[in-house]
Amino acid sequence: MTTKRTDLALEARELYQESCEKTTHLHGVKATKRRQEGYGITVVEVLTPRGAALMDKPQGTYCTIDLTSFWERKSDFFPRAVRVIAHHLTQMIPETGNILVVGLGNRAMTPDAIGPQTVSHLLVTRHLHKEGGLFASFRPVSTLAPGVLGTTGMETLEAVRGVVGQTKPSAVIVVDALAARRTERLCNTVQIADTGLIPGSGVGNHRQGLNRESLGVPVIAVGIPTVVDSVTLCMDALDDAGANHPLWEHIPHMMVTPQDIDAQVTDLAKLLGYAITYALQPLELEDIGALLG
């Protein structure tokens, strides 16, 4: 049976509630909502194995940040968004130790380039930390953009595991593109999870998972949905129109992305790069901007 596809825990919870017509409690899952610096925050906690099975998501915490205010360009929209994302990252990152940031995806495919572009906006300090002096107080941070299997011949897990073995980080932050169910969440949502992720999930090319089990250290996943599956998009439209579901069989499988995806990915990669740096280093935003040039 065809199902509606999403990588967002927030939408997975919505789909479960819709399937049960909101009459069945989602056991083992807790959701809370609030606002922070003008941005909507939804935290979904998958607490039990049963909840994980119902959600089809690993147990853990999924924080979703609504970026509507970011695109409205209201006063201080960028620094406020940086602080909000950084705040929730710090809830999941160990307080000390070296951090490896991995930008997943294909730089040549714009909807899948959010990871590689993000690492271009990160302050890399591992090599400087060893020199002492001004950078002695900085947290050691290294980055990796491993590319994709089709251009490197290596599974992402192989490349990341090798670097983890050499640098021995206290945690890994992975940044990747995701798939959403709703078009209004494309490039309009950041999901931060302490469960790791499966590379390529956003574009339907699932690889081996990056998580604590496969890498031996905590893995924090930061994702932004940049595509929606055409079948999911049409299924929702058919549901809204009251059409028969057998029409699904005639829907071609493809990924749909915003027309201005290149501009949006450029803005969002800078946002994530600054937010990760702000979460890791004892710097103000003005200092980060000056150091990154």
Image: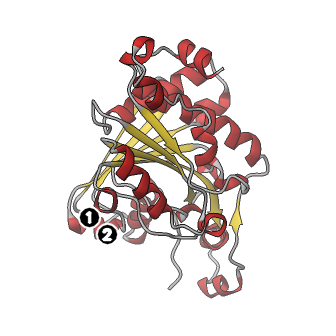
Is 173 positioned to the left or the right of 285 in the image?
left
The residue beneath circle 1 is: 51
For the residue pair 230 and 140, the one nearer the viewer reads as: 140
Give the image location of residue 34, x and y in percent: 38, 34
- Which label number is shown at residue 217? none
For the residue pair 197 and 235, the one nearer the viewer reads as: 197
Quadrant where the image shows the C terminus: top right
Q: Is residue 98 above or below residue 253?
A: above
Q: Is residue 76 above or below residue 204?
A: above
- Which label number is shown at residue 54? 2
Query: Regarding mark 2 in the picture, which secondary structure is present there?
Result: helix
Amino acid type of the residue that numbered disc 1 sits on in the rendered structure: Gly
- In three-dimensional space, the C-alpha distance between marks 2 and 1, rounded to whole angstroms, equals 5 Å
Picture residue at 54% right of the left edge, 44% below the top: 189
Give the image location of residue 38, x and y in percent: 50, 25
Amino acid type of the residue that numbered disc 2 sits on in the rendered structure: Leu
Is 25 positioned to the left or the right of 172 in the image?
left
For the residues labelled 2 and 1, say whether their Cβ atoms are less than 8 Å apart.
yes
